[in-house]
Each structure stands twice: as C-alpha cells, then as structure tokens.
Image (cartoon, helix red, strand yellow):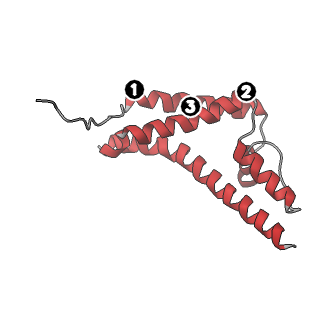
Amino acid sequence: MHATDSIYLLAADAILLIHALFVAFVVFGLVVVYIGHGLSWAWVRGYWFRIVHLICIAIVVVQSWIGVLCPLTTWEMQLREKAGADSYTGSFIQHWLQRILYYEAPDWVFLLVYTIFGIIVFASWFIVRPIRKRTGKKSK
C-alpha cells in the first residue's frame, strides 16, 4: 500500500465517521426531543437545534425521493476506490443495515422509512414547539 492510498483510506474513514455522526444526530435528535419534552429539558426546544435537525432529515427525504445518493456516500466510495479498497453499492444506510443487521430490502422500503421518519420529525415541531429567543432591545 502506498502512502497516498493510506491518505485516501483515512479520508474515506473520516467521511464515514461524519456520516455516522450525521445519522446519529438525525435519529437520536428526534428521540432526545421527545424524551426532553417529557423531562422538561428546555434546550430541546432550542430553535437552532430544531431547525438544523429538520433540515438534515429534509435533505435525506428529498435525496431519497429524487433518487440521489448522499454525497458523503459517493465521496467515501470514490476515496476507497482510489485507494484500491473495496467499496459498496447503494446508500449508506442500506449498506450498514445490511452489514450490521443482515437486512435487505428494496429501495422503496428505505424511501418509506425515511419519509415516515421525516413526517415524525416535522410533527415534532407541533408537538414539542421550538422556542426562538428574542434578543432585540426594547426602544424607549
């Protein structure tokens, strides 16, 4: 293995880590919103936390509906191929669900799951309303 191959693999692993953190944020972010609501944690109503969370799942849902692979998956696969390592086909979630759970499903199943999850995240805006703090000063 050449030094450049190691750099490509390191970069691919870094993207994989970022991707895993993204997925964890989307999944556990929703769980934390509902748990935090039940436990009266004020921070789960934070506007910026909630808007970033909503945008993240919206990106996933839109990509799946238009049939576009996540750019993180594409970049990771390209870097692994440049390093001469094995890559995978399909989406990040499909690949890791198959590896971890030995689960296979048609694309429409993942599309349905992403969409339902996105609807639940959207519904959380009405169930656990975000609060946007006003920082403006009052005029005299």
Kindly indicate whether the residue at mark 1 contacts the one at mark 3 (C-beta within 8 angstroms). no
**Dot 2 crowding, Cα within 10 Å, few <14, some 14–19, many 20+:** few
Q: Nearer the viewer, mark 1 or mark 2?
A: 2
Provide residue 18's location: percent of width, then percent of height: 62, 54
For mark 1, give the secondary structure: helix
Amino acid under disc 2: Ile
Provide residue 90's location: percent of width, then percent of height: 80, 42
Kindly indicate whether the residue at mark 2 contacts the one at mark 3 (C-beta within 8 angstroms). no
- Most extreme residue toward the left is 140
Q: Earlier in the sequence, mark 1 or mark 2?
A: 2
Q: Nearer the viewer, mark 3 or mark 2?
A: 2
Amino acid under disc 1: Phe
For mark 3, give the secondary structure: helix
The relative height of residue 111 versus residue 36 in the rendered view (above or below) is: above
Q: Earlier in the sequence, mark 3 or mark 2?
A: 2
On the picture, is 112 further left or further right than 76? left
Q: Earlier in the sequence, mark 3 or mark 1?
A: 3
Q: Which residue is mark 2?
A: 66
Looking at the rendering, in which quadrant would you find the N terminus?
A: bottom right
Q: Is residue 102 visible?
A: no
On the picture, is 27 further left or further right than 86? left
Q: Which residue is mark 3?
A: 118
Disc on res. 126: 1
Provide residue 96's location: percent of width, then percent of height: 72, 51
Give 79 or 24, whichever is nearer the viewer: 79
The relative height of residue 134 versus residue 80 in the rendered view (above or below) is: above
Please tell me which residue is depicted at 78% across the width and 63% down the height of the picture: 8
- Most extreme residue toward the front is 140
**Dot 3 crowding, Cα within 10 Å, few <14, some 14–19, many 20+:** many
Amino acid under disc 3: Gly
Looking at the rendering, in which quadrant would you find the C terminus?
A: top left
